[in-house]
Image (cartoon, coloured by chain):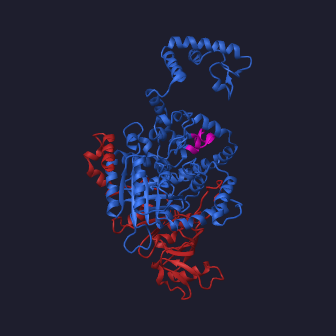
Chain colours: A red, B blue
Amino acid sequence: MGREEILKRVTAALGDRRPSQTDRAALDARMAARPAGPPVRLEGDLADIFIAKATANLFTVERIASLQMLVPAVRALLTESDEAPDISMAATLNHVGWPAGWNINYGTGRPTEALSVTSALAGIAETGSVVLASGVGSPAGLNFLPDLHVVVLRASDILAHPEDVWRRMETNPTAWPRAVNVISGPSRTADVGGVIVRPAHGPKRVHLVIVDS
Amino acid sequence: MTAHAPSFHERASHALADANLQRSIAGLKGGFVAARARAVAALPEFQAMREAGAAIKDHTLENLDYYLERYEAEVLKRGGHVHWATDAADACRIVREICARAGAKIVTKGKSMVSEEIGLNEALEADGIEVIETDAGEYIVQLAKETPSHIVMPTIHKTTGQITDLFHEHHRRYGFAEPAQDAAELIGQVRSVLRAKFFAADVGITGANFLIAETGSNVIVTNEGNGDLTSTLARVHIVTAGIEKVVPTLNDAAVLLRLLARSALGMDVTSYVTYATGPRRPGDLDGPEEYHVVLIDNGRTKMLEGAYRPMLRCIRCAACMNHCPVYMSVGGHAYGWVYPGPMGAVLTPMIAGHEKAQELPHACTLNGRCQQVCPVKIPLPDMLRRLRHDQWEAGFIRGAARWGISAWAWLASRPRLYHALTRMMVAVAGLTGRSRGRFRHLPLASGWTQGRDMPAPQGETFHVAWAKSKRRR
């Protein structure tokens, strides 16, 4: 009922000469072409720009040669006394060879999460952001619940702009994920006295591990 | 939410006399403006981006029926539900029904201006539901039983001391016995108290900075991460959004997001931009089982009709109020409704009605800064001028003001009489006031002279001086 009423009001407000009546094909074509806005110029090596921007966004950044180096990288982030760490991880990273003594939750995020490890599908150099998609092996909650969020990103997945990420992703209903999280730093707020406090509800720290090969 | 009864004048006077409020606003005066200026200067493409952003919004509005239907179709294909609400009451009814079907006892909320506009919290609380705002600022304002005074920084009017007292009163039952020492500790309490609520919530309600027709997604922009925990952890996710929030594609949203972060906070990008689309997919470990969007008209199709259509380009960045000398003097509550500042002075009469916002279009010096900084180039001063005209036509301007303006119009349309009369007045005023150079008091103008002196005329009118200077040339 509300639907027909509102669409009727919209149509009436736009008048008879609006293009949507005369030229739906042109609108379909615009949707298919998805024109990009004014290009934002970036100068230099994409990975360098990305790292500089991400660092400015208060990510901590580390580069490793291969995924095999991920275990020592994560171990270095644990507190020294933590011999049997209890962490959460996206199942997409379960093949990396984690120590047998570690308690690793591959399920959904829990109310208390010290550390989680998830992987990004892309990095955006323009803003120093990482793009994470929810899926069977990667619950979105792991990006928001931990105190320390470790994001694994392949260097070859660093792209210039968000438009480049969208070009790489399938947008059809079966392929497009429920949640696409573009993350550009730790959680923060300035709602008390205008003072910036980290964290608010999400991670206090986000650590990027860039994998070169 | 209903508009407050006292007049803008009364609220503004109260605000000007409130030392705490004046201190809070003063602290932010430089911050927002300087941060925005820096961020804009750092992007050489910003002006081109503004043109593109305004064009995207105009294009979408010109074809709004097409894009709404297209957006709806994509949401449905991905397993979501779309509801259409003609007005505030209709929107509240729809959300209440979804909550009732879900058996909701606890509802978490991400920041949503449109939900404030429709008075959603009150409606849900009347059904016995515990409604919890999760944006730290909105949470504080809700605990204090107040309303936001700024659309991006809801607590701009509150001092840290006031928040400390507020939490000391309300957080003891969560085990925080001692008053918090500083902002970090206060936010720590918010994190701890709300973490449990996110997990306990049956329904999560968020707004949408944008709706994307291409993918059927709603976009939420936050720095806290509260919107994501709201939309991920509850069993049902409801999105409340005005119909003007739809944009065609992900690339169109990219243009507007570049404008939004810089205009709102002076940042290149916020910590979180999330594209949420439909319920959890087969095999997904988290995410809502139900996804609902409530598309709300509530006066927007009326704006779409004509002269006020550009107002629907608004992306709620708050740059207009951050640069407004009136807002920066009296704060947001003086405007009496959900939307303050220049954008509010246009939206409130358009949505809540002229009778509830008679003074707002006049609470403007027409200095034009709001239009200069608006990321989608809304001609706010023109709209405020037009609203004044509409008020005149509709007979809302009455009494001495109407009589005075009519008399002025009569005189101003008779040039000879006007010139004679002004020459005479200037001569008399010049003679009586020249010794001091200014007037402390003027008959019929006490409203002006209470706050400042009126300079005395120096002997001749502008027209006479102009004619003389032309002859000299």
Nearer-the-camera pick, A107 or B460: A107
B300 lies above or below B359: below
* Residue lying at 59% horizontally and 12% vertically, measured from the top left: B423
Q: Position of residue B273 (x, y in %)?
A: 49, 61
Q: How many labels does the image show?
A: 0
B233 lies above or below B363: below
Q: Where is residue A46 in the image (x, y as percent from the top left)?
A: 50, 66
A91 lies above or below B177: below
Residue furthest bottom in the image: A100
Q: Where, by quadrant of the figure, is residue B76 drawn?
A: bottom left
Nearer-the-camera pick, B95 or A151: B95
Q: Position of residue B457 (x, y in %)?
A: 65, 18
Magenta stretch, residue numbers: B321-334
* Residue lying at 58% horizontally and 45% vertically, measured from the top left: B322
Q: In this view, does B8 lie to the left or right of B354?
A: right
Nearer-the-camera pick, A64 or B346: B346
Residue furthest right in the image: B435
Nearer-the-camera pick, A209 or B115: B115
Residue A161 visible in the snapshot: no
Residue B301 visible in the snapshot: yes
Q: Where, by quadrant of the figure, is residue B434 drawn?
A: top right
Judge whether residue B216 is colored magenta: no
Judge whether residue B333 is colored magenta: yes
Q: Position of residue B329 (x, y in %)?
A: 63, 40
